[in-house]
Amino acid sequence: MPEFVSPQLATLTEKPPEGSGWLHELKFDGYRMICHLSRKQVKFWSRNGKDWSQKFPSIAKVVKELPVSTAILDGEIVAVDSQGHASFQKLQQTIGKPGSAFTFHIFDLLYLDGFNLTGVKLRERKELLAQLLSGGDEKSPLRYSDHVEGNGQQFFKQACAYKIEGVVSKQADSLYESTRSKSWLKIKCIMRQEFVIAGYLPSDKGFPGFGALLLGVYEKGTLTYAGRVGTGFSIKQRLDLKEKLDRFVKASSPFAALPRDSALRKAVWTTPKLVGEVAFTEWTSDGFIRHPSFQGLRLDKKPSEVVREKPA
């Protein structure tokens, strides 16, 4: 049984694929986790190989009760807000705190009782996964991530109507690949991705902490300015983020180039150590984001991994 399996990642596209050979799942707004169960011991690994086992004790307790000796589960851990919607901000605020309630939406099974299943077709892996999770009660935090076969466009429209982040379309007969693959495709209802935080602007309206974060992405190893975000924060988030950023203050801009923007003369620059997730409406022709809203920090992403996501 491998200690860690790098997760398969989906390629961004503009619309769902057609045909009956695709399985379409909801795209969850949480943290991707690879969960290892081995003789009643449970470990959670983030997508970049960090051990997050201590953060989800309530889920680990239920995983231990599965009727198997060894298994590797692939899924997304989600927190739900008072409206019943997955909330990345609530996940950020409650992760690691005693008594926090999460759900683990499991969409793949990579290993089961001595058998490596990465060379088995996705359709068959999901059948085994459904059987494994079938004995749980309705209140269990373990959820089987179901799918629709074919009808990708209709499924996508319905997901967007319910204000879900998007869908993931997967080739039904594909094998599991520990890389970014075109046998898994992600289609988003709104533009949303990670950005490196490289500084902030002090507030000119009396906001606590800061006025806006300065964002960037890497292009061929160079940090490129992508705009700024000043909405989506609670007061506590503003204060906490400023405290974190002030540890990394530097004298000069970390960006390769900056636009002509007089506001940036007041910028407090920082070493690009933090990664934030931001929702926005579109990229401008100049390469900046429009109407951004901050969603939360990404503790599972390295700054060097953050690039501009372009549909294939």
Image: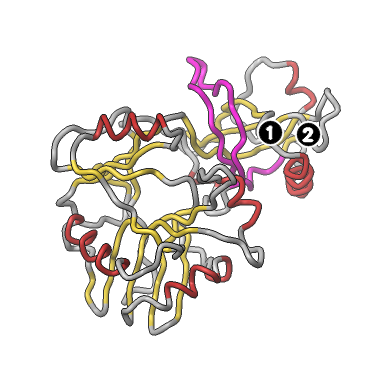
**Residue extent of the magenta highlight:** 270-297
Task: Judge left or right: residue 67 versus residue 173.
Answer: right
Question: Which residue occupies the extreme bottom position in the image?
Answer: 39
Asked if residue 170 lies in the magenta stretch, the reply is: no
Q: Give the labeled residue for mark 1.
A: 213
User: Pointers 1 and 2 in contact (CB under 8 A)?
Assistant: yes
Residue density around tag 1, few if under 14, some if 14–19, many if 20 or more, within 10 Å: many
In front here: 165 or 62? Answer: 62
- Residue 100 location, quadrant: bottom right
Measured as percent of width and height from the top left, residue 52 is found at 53, 66
Q: What residue is drawn where x is 55% and y is 71%?
A: 57
Q: Which mark is residue 210?
A: 2
Q: What residue is drawn where x is 65% and y is 33%?
A: 232
Asked if residue 286 lies in the magenta stretch, the reply is: yes
Task: Judge left or right: residue 56 versus residue 312.
Answer: right
Q: Is residue 170 placed above or below 192 in the rendered structure?
A: below
Task: Judge left or right: residue 236 versus residue 295.
Answer: right
Q: Amino acid at mark 2?
A: Phe
